[in-house]
Image (cartoon, helix red, strand yellow):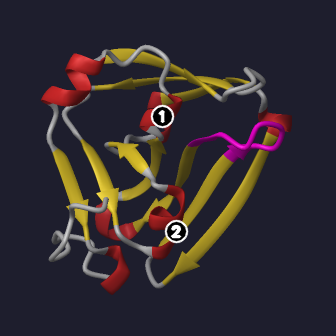
Amino acid sequence: MKTYHGSCHCGRVAFEADMDFEGSSKCNCTYCWKQRNWNVATMKPDQFRLLKGEEDLGDYARSGEGFETRHRFCRHCGTATHGHGRIDAMGGDYVGVRIAALDDLPVEELLAAPVTYCDGLHDNWWNPPAEIRHL
């Protein structure tokens, strides 16, 4: 387990996360597609610590059958930093960190890690979509 640090572009929001960086995920759902979302594998809430900027975070929430997701972003610079919520099929509460918000993830480590592709567009989350080149 390693502690990674992240922040938004303007520096008002900062966090740290304890994780074994074993991969990342990309999804083709309409939200992830519009955001070009690339996440670090989800972790339990106690592995994530917001160091500063709670008052600077905006929030976009989405829920459905068996899930609730809150996407967090800096209200000043617009940088998406993390998300959190509950997905029963994944074991409950979680936090996911945006790779682009990590300040100290070595490029070599990112390149060596596998990417899991999720077909969220068709609510087929556990399988990759037919086409992934655009993700």
Picture residue at 31% right of the left edge, 59% below the top: 135
Magenta region includes residue 95: no
Q: Mark 2 belongs to which amino acid?
A: Tyr
69 or 31, which is in the foreground?
Answer: 31
In the picture provided, is 48 more to the left or to the right than 70? left
Q: Is 85 in front, or is 133?
A: 133
Q: Position of residue 50 (x, y in %)?
A: 64, 28
* Tag 2 secondary structure: helix
Where residue 22 sits, quadrant-wise, is top left
Q: Magenta stretch: give its range.
A: 73-81
Q: Which mark is residue 51?
A: none
User: Please, what is the three-letter code of the amino acid marked with disc 1?
Assistant: Ala
| Towards the viewer: 127 or 69 | 127
Instruction: Indicate yes or no whether the magenta region holds residue 74.
Output: yes
Residue 28, by quadrant, is bottom left
Q: Is residue 108 left or right of residue 100?
A: left
Q: Residue at x 38, y 68 (%)?
A: 88
Question: Which residue is disc 1 drawn over?
Answer: 100
Q: Name the quadrant containing residue 123.
A: bottom left
Residue 49, percent across and down? 58, 26
Disc number for residue 31: 2
Q: Tell me where residue 84 appears, x and y as whole percent.
A: 54, 51
Where is residue 116 shown, x and y percent of the image? 20, 53
